[in-house]
Image: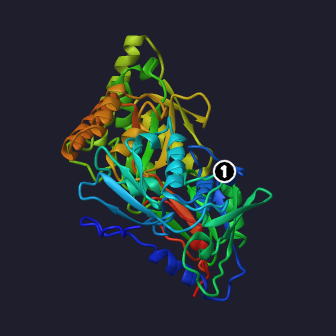
Amino acid sequence: MRRLPIPTRRRAATGAAVIAAFALAGCGSRHSATVQVVVIDDVAAPFGSGARLSTAAGAVRAATTEGLVAFDAQGRIVPALADRWIVTDDGRSYIFRLRDGTWPDGSPITGESARTALRRALAGLRGTPLALDLAGTDDIRVMAGRVIEIRLPRAMPDLLQLLGQPELGLVWRGKGNGPMRLSRDGAAAVLTPIAPEKRGLPAVAGWEAATVRLAALPAAQAVARFNAGDADVLLGGQIQDFPLARSVGLIRGGIQPDPVTGLFGLAVLHDDGFLALPENREAIAMAIDRAALIAPFGLSGWQATTRMVAPGTTDDDGTVGERWAGLSMAERRSEAARRIARWRDRSQREGPVQVRIALPPGPGADVLFERLADDLRQIGIEARRTRAGADADLRLVDVVARYPGRAWYLNQLSCVARRGLCSADADAEVSAARAAPDRAQAIALLADAEATLTKANVFIPFGAPLRWSLVRGSARGFAANHWAIHPLMPMATPPN
């Protein structure tokens, strides 16, 4: 097979980092140790499947089913089934050279089998926002025995980030290809690293690594297990459980927040009654003091926003700014209260407007609701809390961005995502951006879509999500990162 050319735009990635990690795994004395990981999630979650993976299911899937590329502990893209790749100068062709290895059934990893597995993975995402993110990746070609190309109708600078998602793990004849092997111990997942030479990588003399045992538990039980010294790492913390982290003593370990971006706010679930008018939905958004909303949690550096799209995305052209920038909090609430009173007069309603807000259980969610209820009370709205999944008017959305582009936010709030109200006009503008002939036009269309969605007031943003972990001082292979992705294989690497 001919050697892949050195790219002129981007340097080809190699498997050197992975081989180095395996070499580290051969050092040290704790080869037989078991790393105990607990995830805040449903007890059965480690063995979940489908196109929408939970935290625990995503960690297990990524550990047992490699895609073309993967994430390391720092959230960077590293080789997986593909040991190197190049990107053409126009960004419209990604060429992957697959490693010289076999699938779990012993058959060789070839361009044909990888293409088949990748097409199957993409097909399984239909009807999800991730499928929208990956639109245009269906032209997959076999160039040689172990070389495939993804040819794109437009440049997709975030494609590698998407291909590293656990949902894009490649399955061949019902099984994934490591880097860890899964067994079950009751409700816990036991993950055993696979030797490098069995995965098509160079053998490492004396190679050994620890086993990872992963269990999913409700938040209070997960934190109690960590406090008792029965877990090395706790993953999956969100705002509703954050106060529980304060019970952890310094000698037990540290709180590790991830500097993530994404959607954190309230989805509007229907458009009847008070919520029928976009200006009434905007009144709710105007009334919320976002900084005060998060102040009780003591989060330094937390970024509030009134935008549907987090500021600072890679394709933010600055045409859409923060809302109500020229108004003080008092002025915003005064205008919101006038809208409430006007609607009440027109509809001949007496007393405060009632709004049901669905939030997950947890002490952090209790604090969040108290702050929201106080803000809305000041404009004549009485907030009632309902549990997640119950009938409600507004529901908390708390999702970490998978890549730094504007389209991720718009796809998450699209009609395909079915989070609540949506805008067909905004979806059409995003679709036009996907088909745009050049990047400048695509960016302009995405800005138009954000403006359209903002005018519709279908989502009430607060700011960045909160993700946190607990990590014992002796734990290895963990790093906070922008995607809150914490692969298990690095945690199995013993210390030097």
Q: Nearer the viewer, residue 273 or 298?
A: 273
Locate residue 188: give its quadrant: bottom right
Residue at coordinates 28% horizontally, 34% vertically from top-left?
432
Give the x, y percent position of residue 379: 39, 31
User: Front-most of 280 and 63?
Assistant: 63
> As displayed, is residue 75 above or below residue 306?
below
- Quarter location, residue 237: bottom right
Q: Residue at x 67, y 89 (%)?
A: 29
**As drawn, is 60 to the left or to the right of 325?**
right
Q: Is residue 43 visible?
A: yes
User: Of the residues shown, which amino acid type is indicated by label 1?
Assistant: Gly
User: Which of the pair 381/206 is nearer the observer?
Assistant: 206
Counting every numbered tag in the picture gives 1
Horizontal and vertical percent for residue 44? 72, 50
Q: Position of residue 411 (x, y in %)?
A: 40, 39
Residue 224 image point, x, y percent: 70, 64
- Name the image colouring: rainbow
Residue at the far right in the pictured view: 186
Binning the other alpha carbons within 10 Å of mark 1 as few (below 14), some (14 to 19) or many (20 upward) gives few
Is the C terminus in the top left, top right, bottom left or bottom right quadrant?
Answer: bottom right
* Numbered disc 1: secondary structure: loop
- Quadrant of res 120: top right
Disc 1: which residue:
174
- In this rendering, does residue 325 appear at all? no
Q: Residue at x 59, y 49 (%)?
A: 54
Rendered position, 86 above or below 28: above
In the foreground, 190 or 478: 190
Going by the image, does 191 lie left or right of 74?
right
Report the quarter where the N terminus lies: bottom left
